[in-house]
Image (cartoon, helix red, strand yellow):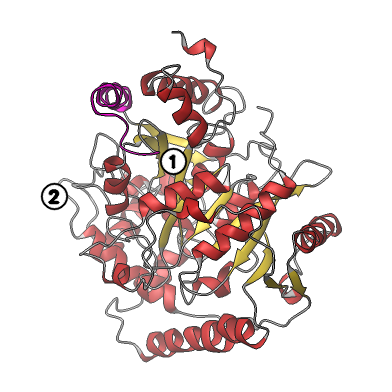
Amino acid sequence: MHTDSFQLGENTIKQIQQQMEAGNLSAKQLTLLYLKQIANYNQDGPQINAIVEVNPDALHIAEALDVERKKDGARGPLHGIPVIVKDNIDTADKTHTTAGSVALQHHYATEDAFIVKQLRDAGAIILGKANLTEWANFMTEGMPNGYSSRGGQVLNPYGPGKFDVGGSSAGTGAGIAANFAVGGIGTETSGSILSPASSNSLVGIKPTVGLLSRTGIIPISNSQDTAGPMTRTVEDAAILLGVLSGIDEKDPATKMNPIVIQDYTSYLNKDGAKNTRIGIPRNYLTNLTDEETALFNQAVKDLEALGATIVDSIELNNTPKSSVMFHEFKNGVNAYLKNSPGSSPVHSLLDVINYNQAHPKEALQFDQTLLLASEKKSGTLTEAEYLRDRIQDLAQSQENGIDKIIDDHELDALLFANNLGAGIAAKPGYPSITVPGGYTSEGKPIGITFTSKAFSEATLIEMAYAYEKKTLHRKAPTL
């Protein structure tokens, strides 16, 4: 059978598995189709520049999985499914892990991140690494979303060079929107999945901190970091979330989850918004144009039509400026880099700063103000400033923030546009899911984001799925 008879389109995981089970498609053929898509649009054509490295073993892995399928059947829904992984997540294969930094351009991880092991065990093919905003957007102020010294600038496939691609998981967002893989993995500290997902008309799940292991991910903030799936449908995101989650002995946060759910697809409920109460913190919707506000208001009407009760114009407090990320970044990056191989030029945050200063042309197009500010902290997390800010962050975002507003109004979720609520949900490590919410007259994508308390992913998936199925907003970009 020739790959020509299978059209890549925006096939879902389930649709692809049906084709594979019927013998109409192999994992090798599918992988070749995605490699062709990358060849045509990543550095050629519109030069989306989302993929920074292709896994040289991807086709061999695909063929091996085809042999296994014939012999033993499929391992599960991800068997033979190509995915891309953000370049701050460790992959112990022939691809580098660099956080987009030229200082780490020769850095290979010695073992897979826990979530990468989960993907491989499920039969997924790691097709390649996705470009990102350098150091997951914790390098300097004013760096464009999607720029890294190692990978260059990622472009938004809906308007290359015209629309912001979002960050920091820009390559994952643009890559999945441009159909370079079935799904992708991003990471978020505050908005880094939600921003590129909403900017590229995708579904992005930023899970509760602790649902997914943080082991083997180049960190920013121990208290806020999490990986999460970025896909074209809620169903695909739910499948990936179940595979990615799991208890990791090396990550104590993964033992906080009181409700271990292996399969989130049972929450794909078209009536998932019925009898729910959804709050709208209007004070968070100030950065929108009139057209974007109209799209958001339409989403509210659509949810009402689905049977949700809308509690409008509630006041959610804004969280004050905090030093937490500066303290935790130095601590986390030093702990990560101490394991770099001896041949690596960088073994600490200070080494990175010095490397960048010695190579300003390649490394410092946009300065490194955040790295410098973080280096001034002790990295021991003993400062009163850090401890007070961490305690205050939790009080303002949790007890007096999301928990309070949800309890006071008996809500199931809060609704935001794009990633405008990312900051307040990030501080207590609370989950959010963003879904395509339509396009402006220029064609710029808008996302609708549901947020709730810890480990409420199942509820959020139900609401997001019901909204997605009613509206079916997502349209593929014209490349």
- Assess whether residue 11 is covered by the magenta stretch: no
Please report the residue visible at 41 percent of the width from the left and 24 percent of the height from the top.
21
x, y (%) of residue 377? Answer: 35, 78
Please report the residue visible at 27 percent of the width from the left and 79 percent of the height from the top.
380
Quadrant assignment for the N terminus: top left
Dot 1: element = strand
Residue 130, labelled with which disc? Answer: 1
Rate crowding at label 1 as few (under 14), some (14 to 19) or many (20 or more) other CA atoms within 10 Å. many
Left or right position of 448 against 257? right
x, y (%) of residue 296? Answer: 78, 59
Is residue 88 visible from the viewing direction of this image?
no
Q: Quadrant of residue 370?
A: bottom left
Left or right position of 245 against 434? left
Q: Quadrant of residue 466?
A: bottom right
Front residue of 24/379: it is: 24
Q: Amino acid at mark 2?
A: Gly
Q: Is residue 151 above or below residue 222?
A: above
Please report the residue visible at 42 percent of the width from the left and 39 percent of the height from the top.
84
Q: Which residues are magenta?
A: 57-77
Dot 2: element = loop
Earlier residue among tags 2 and 1? 1
Residue 342, labelled with which disc? Answer: 2
Q: Amino acid at mark 1?
A: Ala
Please report the residue visible at 32 percent of the width from the left and 56 percent of the height from the top.
217
**Mark closer to the observer (2, 1):** 1
Front residue of 234/202: it is: 234
